[in-house]
Image: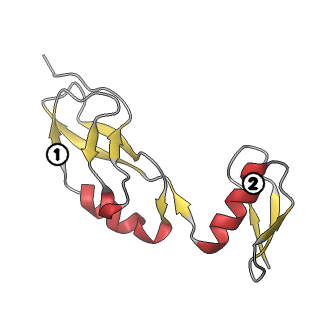
Amino acid sequence: MKEMICICCPMGCRLKVYDEESPIRVEGNTCPRGAKYGAEEAVCPKRVVTSVVRVNGGEIAMVSVKTSDVIPKSMIFDALALIKGKTIDAPVGEGDVIVKDIFGTGVDFVATKAVGKSV
């Protein structure tokens, strides 16, 4: 049995996950998302990853980026290494793909805001 706190919403339910059972049993959740989160977290924890990328010729020097979906926690540092030192040219649109298909996961790094060209 593993104890964890659900991060799906601000309620922060205290979960008990019985991962030695099949199917995995989750207690303490107040919604179905908590049950799903607990079961997935016990088997293969996943996270959305956020970072920044340099922008050449932009109104600002950096643009924030995030993964378009969750990736396995074990890939976080490798995914960050993909964008370390990466530079893109302005303009950048919100949602523009910065790195496509991270390690064959089908998940992209995308810009989370627009950055126009500097004048």
Q: Is residue 113 left or right of residue 57?
A: right
How far from the left and from the top, in percent, is residue 114? 31, 26
Mark seen at residue 98 = none
Q: Tell me which corner region of the image, top left, top right, bottom left or bottom right, holds residue 27.
A: bottom right
Residue positioned 64% across, 65% down in the render = 40
Q: Tell me which corner region of the image, top left, top right, bottom left or bottom right, holds residue 1.
A: bottom right
Q: Tell me the amino acid under the disc marked 1.
A: Thr
Q: Secondary structure at mark 1?
A: strand
In this view, 57 is above or below 104: above
Mark seen at residue 87 = 1
Check disc 1: other Cα within 10 Å, few if <14, some if 14-19, many if 20+.
some
Q: Nearer the viewer, mark 2 or mark 1?
A: 2
Residue positioned 70% across, 58% down in the render = 36
Q: Which of pointers 2 and 1 lies earlier in the amino acid sequence?
A: 2
How far from the left and from the top, in percent, is residue 55? 19, 37
The one nearer the camera, 62 or 96, is: 96
Q: For the view shown, which residue lies furthest in the front direction? A: 23
Q: Is residue 72 left or right of residue 25?
A: left
The one nearer the camera, 41 or 119, is: 41
Q: Tell me the amino acid under the disc marked 2.
A: Gly
CA gap, disc 2 to disc 1?
A: 38 Å
Residue positioned 85% across, 49% down in the render = 30
Q: Secondary structure at mark 2?
A: helix
Q: Tell me which corner region of the image, top left, top right, bottom left or bottom right, holds residue 60.
A: top left
Mark seen at residue 34 = 2
How far from the left and from the top, in percent, is residue 93? 28, 27
How far from the left and from the top, in percent, is residue 17? 78, 71
Q: Is residue 82 left or right of residue 12?
A: left
